[in-house]
Image (cartoon, coloured by chain):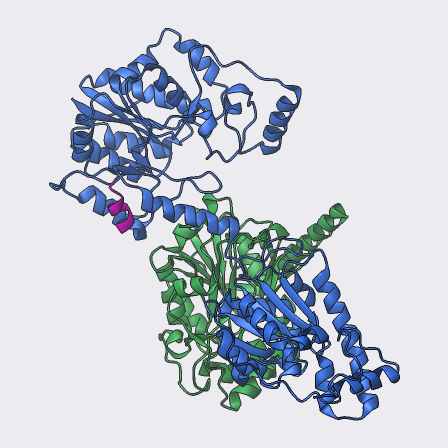
Chain colours: A green, B blue
Amino acid sequence: MGVVTSYRMRLRRRYWLARAFGKRRQLRVLADRTRAIRRRDILLVCTVRNERIRLPYFLKYYRQLGVDHFLFIDNGSEDGTSEYLVDQHDCSTWRAKGSYKRSAFGMDWVNHLLRRYGHRHWCLTVDVDEFFVYPFCDTRPIRALTDWLEASSIRSFGAMLLDMYPKDAVTAEPYQEGQDPLEIAPWFDAGNYVFEKNPLLWNLWIQGGPRARAFFADQPRKAPALNKVPLVRWHRNYTYVSSTHALLPRGLNRTYADDGGEKASGILLHAKFLDVLSEKAREELRRGEHYAGGREYAAYAGAIDETRSLWCKWSERYVNWRQLEILGLISKGNWA
Amino acid sequence: MTLGFVMLVHTAFDRAAQVARYWAARGCPVVIHVDKAVRPKDYKPFAEALRPDPNIRFCKRVSVEWGTWSLVEATQNGAQALLRNYPDVRHVYLASGACLPLRPVEELRAYLDDRPDTDFIESVTTDEVTWTIDGLEMERFTLRFPFSWRKQRRLFDGYVDLQRKLGLGRKVPDGISPHLGSQWWCLTRSTLEAILQAPDREQMDRYFRHVWIPDEAYFQTLARRYSGRIESRSLTLSKFDVQGKPHIFYDDHLQLLQRSDCFVARKIWPRANRLYDTFLGQAPDAAPRKEPNPARIDRLFSRSNLRRAEGRTGLISQGRLPAPHWDGTRTCAAYAVFSGFDDIYGDFDMWLARRIGGRVHGHLFHPARAEFAGGERVANGCISDNATLRDYRPEQFLTNLLWATRGERQSFQFGPGDIQDVRDFLARDPNATIVAVTGAWAVRLFRDQRDFSAIRSEAASLQKTELAFIQNLRATSTKARVTVWSLSEFLENPMERLQHMVELIMGHDPRRLTEVPELPDLTGFGRFLQTLRNEGMKPVTTGDIPPEYGERQ
């Protein structure tokens, strides 16, 4: 049985690699600075669409953490996103022509770039509204983490999504370019997350948070998955299979301990719920290029118009990683 | 007389050079061994930059693999070169390229000047060693280890097992008794010379060549043979994690390191600029000399190892999700579950909250919604009272609630009318105290005054559920503290029972209960039960309550 499953997993991995290979021609290079990538550089891969307003802060945040080079895939932006990215000295940018949906929500493109440029690099794959936080991130650059992971023979690092929201309605305070989105949306749900191990891919399936509470209370099984493995010491044979929720080979998904111990983990602060979302939600709904028929965006479009707030009495206000550690959302593991 | 360093380097050359220069400039000669596996591209500029310094030399290079003899050989080469080239060296300090002096080297030199004959080397008999991660202590000396632990783990383990089974082994040479200890030592010239110039050195080297991790055994064992005065501790602060690799120090450890008063620490993260700048830049302290005191750092790292190995009890998170068969405690704090009391007493919640404090919820698993204390719609951690959400993963709902409210005792009501999915979980949880009055639902039904056929079928279904619950509680796998009374036992002496119940939660209290909730009017209750029986529904969990119960009151 074990052999059969392993073989199935191998086929599946091959399938994803083949898809990525097949979609490579959809990527047209706009600015290729990949020659500047040095041997041990930390890379960041990100797919964007009309995110011009979010980019300055995003780049600032990750440069500060110590990302050395950015690989962007622009999927048909019309707001100057690619023009902005092309001018950045540490960014390489591609334009993807094909359908977002039919390229597995951008994962085929991402897998292709990772295979081509990520081999033997630590690679962080995030969205433009996700901000990576890990233990000691206020005093140690991301390189300290990857050095430690490498010395501990750990190849992948888990970081679940933590949805951040404003206290008032999402549309109440407009987001300004360059602004820290957490100034507007510093609140989060601290302890209503539920977990299940995926028996096949071995990843955790995490749900909960404000979206489950406010939008999916009556159909919790359909609430968005929050588990992510964004940081991986990439190898050309690796592949993401479903967004960054799971990888193959599946050993990479074991970012948790199941013997009562605790493995080190981080979080992706998910600053999705800003005023820019409402416009986006309407557009994405029209475009129909998102997961499960854009079920999520449909829910947002409705909820955001009502000027409803996700905030409740027990919402926590974000302070720093230590707070998340005490709450149990992230763990230092044996990193001290 | 002075102090000399042997420095083993294989990476982070700029930092190694920085530290070597620091020592050399302060009159302490340094002999550097660079791993032969290092590429000339890295080695050359490093060596060429340091060579002009008269206090820095390089010794013959060996290709070093962790856990093998090569490491001892490299150390021997370095020590020989140091002793030969710098005749005024009295103490030899073994360091690595990732070491950083925490106190000015002048202080270390003065410390050693006060103890000119002392060898600082951790050297412990194999019986007392507890820190090996491979579980091999004495066997390091008596088995053979032809396979690499890092690259050929299966062969390594298999061959160890095979030798154990077949009783194979080799003899420890005469004249030495095996000792183990930290690789990082500081020995006197006389001890080191005795070891390196011993007439039987060739024989010893041949023996230790096949000892497992000889760098933690060779000098540690032989120093016992020649030294006049051994201080069995390392002057280098170095701690190991669960995987047996050294903990690494970063900029945010600065204060901790400063307060440790240790002389040298390893390993330092090569990019910890603040640590290097601070410690290499400080002037000797005129204040009285303190003894090294690594206790605080010890505590930090052992806490950290424990966190990885055992985690935080009762936490489920993305880094910790115990498997279904895992046998530990799944909740973080003691809590109490009451069954049946609120069927008997109308205002039981309020009374209980006054008596035992903490947060007293209603029926957390009520089919309609989670009845949080005070009728709240959302509890700590933003846990919703929505029944669908709760019933999606009911055990995790409870685990999460207990975790989010830690520090405050939680109690809740749980009866046969509730969603029963957590029943088994409650029974198996050693943190749960379950106090149940079985058959209490009959009191509620009695007071409800509804259509009797509806009452009859509800009673049947409640009793069925309750019997299954009792079975859970009586199972051998039950770890909860369980007290079960039948309704008739309870009604015999309600005051006594409530007193007992409060003591179960709060511990013994010599004061008697002064205020108990008022028992409802049970006139005709015996008759009611008899009618149930007559209708064909036999109440068993109530215990034996005669038909005339309540007649005389």
Q: Residue at x 36, y 38 (%)?
A: B238
- Tell me where the magenta segment starts and ends, as one range: B255-261
Residue B368: where, in percent of width, then height? 66, 83
Q: Give the vertical position of B349 relative to B109 (above or below).
A: below
Q: Residue at x 50, y 27 (%)?
A: B137
Residue A261 visible in rendering: yes
Say which quarter of the image contains residue A62.
bottom left
Asked if residue B200 lies in the magenta stretch, the reply is no
Which is nearer the eye, B468 or A115?
A: B468
In the picture, the quarter occupied by the N terminus of chain B is: top left
* Apparent side of residue B158 relative to residue B119 in the rendered image (left or right): right
Q: Give the vertical position of A4 relative to B449 (above or below).
A: above
- Direction left: furthest residue: B286
Residue A240: where, in percent of width, then height? 60, 58
- Direction front: furthest residue: B552
Which is nearer the eye, A246 or B364?
A: B364
* Apparent side of residue A257 relative to residue B32 in the rendered image (left or right): right
Q: Residue at x 21, y 47 (%)?
A: B278
- Direction top: furthest residue: B199
- Magenta region, mostly helix, strand or loop? helix
Say which quarter of the image contains residue B204.
top left
* Apparent side of residue B14 relative to residue B36 in the rendered image (left or right): left
Residue B412: where, in percent of width, then height? 59, 75
Residue A221: where, in percent of width, then height? 66, 73
